[in-house]
Amino acid sequence: MYRPTIAQIDRAAVRDNVARIGQIAGTDVCAVVKADGYGHGAVDVATAAIEGGARMLAVALVEEGEQLRRAGVDAEVLLLTEPPVAALDAMVAARLTPLVYSHAAIVALAAIAQQQKTPLSVHVKVDTGMGRVGVPEAQWEDSLRWLTDSPLAVTGIATHLACADEPGNPVTAHQQQQFARYLSMAADSGLDPVHVHAANTAGALAHPNVRHTMVRAGIGIYGLSPSREIVAADYGLRPALRLRSEVSYVKRISAGTPVSYGHRWKAPVDGWIATVPIGYADGVPRALTNRVHVLIGGDTHPMVGTVCMDQVLVWCGETAPSVGDEVVLIGDGLPAEHWADAAETITYEIATGITARVPRKVVA
Ligand SMILES: *Cc1c(COP(=O)(O)O)cnc(C)c1O
């Protein structure tokens, strides 16, 4: 790689964040490493999470689970949604534990279990108000019968919270009550799974009643905040990603000189402008145009002018930058949360938006 634009990954931060979340929740932690570990690199994050005490890992795709297995990761890996039926054999071969909720998946998995004559472990997912996937309450009795009549071993019952990132939202308590009804019906039909889990990071940090035996933490293990109201740093979590580059070109311009597409910024006075080789094709949202700062040599400077595909510009005023000076875009006290706010999105989209063109490099 010739370009100095790199996402540096601090594995120790992930390890410590997992331990911290486990401590706060007082439960097992399932470390969610889907979407290439929220853009941090799934394998490095997965191994760091295990070092931090994660009981299991979770992914969204069979392919993501296969990647972990190829890298030698041996921990239990949950698959958070049912894969296409055509992928079930690959899922079983990769020893992924599915969250099931449809009759079709239960039947297909039961057939595989019958055939291979070993019990197949599943977690069943119920819908308590997320409204996305999960067994609806009206179907729970039937689903319990399908499961208990099958050779499948139900080792977990799970649900997902829709509004946990808003601490005052009453929906979370309502979901918790509905989950309790599902759990008591499951107990009545003889199910006593080891794992009961509902909480994402926001639930784990801010909602003591939803923790059960395990929390599924994604964003928090990366040291990022689930929302404006639930701030990762307040819980002792620290960011694991530092996005850095170097100044590639410098020039002095005079007051009133416009820069970049659309001439959406003009120099207020005579001064120095630096070009940095990173752009929206690397995951710098174009919506950040004229809205955030970067660090050059430890000093804060505004990023100015329209964000381009491969480059951005930084106004240095009277401070003359040099080609090769380090530019920090995220990290060293410039949190990804600033980008999320400025682009009117969430940290999740910022982290997963850093594209494959940016090499990930483990630094600690
Ligand atoms: C992604 C995901 C999580 C992790 O959520 P965070 O808010 O990142 O902690 C947990 N559970 C399910 C079902 C998910 O899809």
Image (cartoon, rainbow, N blue to C red):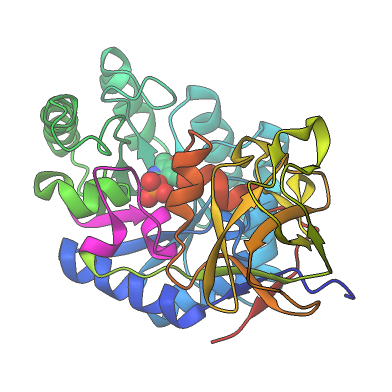
Residue 142's place in the image compared with 50, above or below, is above
Image quarter of the N terminus: bottom right
Q: Residue furthest top?
A: 138
Residue 264 % position (x, y):
71, 33
Q: Residue at x 71, y 79 (%)?
A: 325
Q: Is residue 80 visible?
A: no
Instruction: Please identify the quarter of the rendering in which residue 24 is found.
Output: bottom left
Q: Residue at x 40, y 57 (%)?
A: 224
Residue 10's place in the image compared with 290, above or below, is below
Residue 209 % position (x, y):
9, 45
Q: Residue furthest right?
A: 2
Find out whether residue 263 is within the magenta segment: no
Q: How many marks?
A: 0
Q: Residue furthest bottom?
A: 364
Q: Residues in magenta?
A: 212-234
Residue 95's place in the image compared with 134, above or below, is below
Q: Residue at x 55, y 36 (%)?
A: 82
Q: Nearer the viewer, residue 219 or 265?
A: 265
Q: Where in the image, quadrant-wise, is ligand 1 located?
A: top left
In the visual, does 197 lie left or right of 349? left
Q: Nearer the viewer, residue 169 or 46?
A: 169
Q: Nearer the viewer, residue 40 or 247?
A: 247
Q: Nearer the viewer, residue 165 or 285?
A: 285
Residue 12 % position (x, y):
45, 82
Q: Is residue 252 visible?
A: yes
Residue 19 % position (x, y):
29, 75
Q: Residue at x 16, y 44 (%)?
A: 210
Find out whether residue 231 is within the magenta segment: yes
Instruction: Please identify the quarter of the rendering in which residue 176 is found.
Output: top left
In the visual, does 55 lie left or right of 99? left
